[in-house]
Amino acid sequence: NAGVMQNPRHLVRRRGQEARLRCSPMKGHSHVYWYRQLPEEGLKFMVYLQKENIIDESGMPKERFSAEFPKEGPSILRIQQVVRGDSAAYFCASSRGDRGHEQYFGPGTRLTVT
Amino acid sequence: RKEVEQDPGPFNVPEGATVAFNCTYSNSASQSFFWYRQDCRKEPKLLMSVYSSGNEDGRFTAQLNRASQYISLLIRDSKLSDSATYLCVVNMNSNYQLIWGAGTKLIIKP
């Protein structure tokens, strides 16, 4: 039973480019969450999605960031026109939505903006 | 006041010792509680879910005190591999969103 999958594991982008991060939830999970973690800091919630719906994007920066979870395929976190401050680890988690929303995390994507 | 508060540590503990962490939460409506561990540069991993007064899993025991609004994690016979950051997480009622503590860093020394 595969866990949460994220790719790429490492992504290097130059300032101004676009970054696309992918997340496939665990089998049987229909809820996806994205978090950002800066070095030596805690997890920061970004967005919560179910299939074809954004439920809560209160943690997303207002510009340049978007997320989707289409009917088919992985969830995508998209960062347009990246800046150095976007360099961070981006973790995706999934849950079934029950059991108090236990979340299981993928290995993360480490984005470096040069 | 933060919604979930933890002592950041680090806790430096000799191998074999018992160590305990506390975590306080501000919202009395909180229903579900979790402990995660996170190793350096890795993803958080669910360690224990705490749904009632507490539960035990091997060397790990989690306790919930609703009256005082805190949860604790006890690690007995600590191993070098227990070195990590331990994250306290709270879920309010049926709200999907988990509120994360900043974590307590544990260092087990040989």
Image: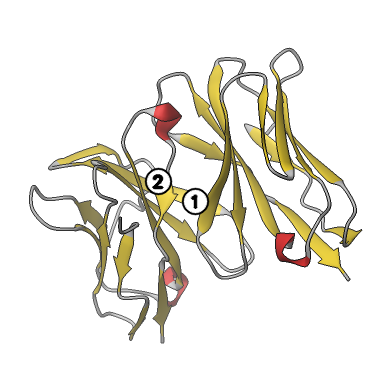
Q: In this view, does B54 lie to the left or right of A96?
A: right
Q: Do labels 1 and 2 share a chain?
A: yes
Residues packed near mark 2 inside 10 Å, few (<14), some (14 to 19) or many (20 plus): some
Residue placed at 55% from the left, 15% from the top?
Answer: B29
Identify the residue under disc 2: A59
Image coordinates for residue B50, horizontal then vertical, percent: 59, 29
Residues packed near mark 1 inside 10 Å, few (<14), some (14 to 19) or many (20 plus): some
The reply to whether residue B102 is in sight is: no
Image coordinates for residue B105, horizontal then vertical, percent: 75, 57
Q: Do the residues labelled 1 and 2 touch (CB within 8 Å)?
A: yes
Can you tell which quarter of the image residue A112 is in?
Answer: bottom left
Residue placed at 28% from the left, 80% from the top?
Answer: A16
* The C terminus of chain A, quarter of image: bottom left
Q: Which of marks 1 and 2 is nearer the N terminus?
A: 1
Can you tell which quarter of the image residue B41 is in?
Answer: bottom right
* The N terminus of chain A, quarter of image: bottom left
Chain identity of mark 1: A
B62 shown above or below B40: above
Q: What residue type is labelled 2?
A: Gly
Q: Is residue B92 left or right of residue B83?
A: left
Image coordinates for residue B4, horizontal then vertical, percent: 65, 35
Secondary structure found at label 2: loop
Count of numbered labels shown in the rendering: 2
Q: Which of marks 1 and 2 is in front?
A: 1
Question: Furthest residue to the top?
Answer: B67
B61 shown above or below A108: above
Q: In terms of depth relative to the viewer, which is nearer, B110 or A101? A: B110
Q: In terms of depth relative to the viewer, which is nearer, B7 or B49? A: B49
Question: Furthest residue to the left?
Answer: A72
Secondary structure found at label 1: strand
Say the numbered circle drawn on residue A44. Answer: 1
B79 shown above or below B76: below
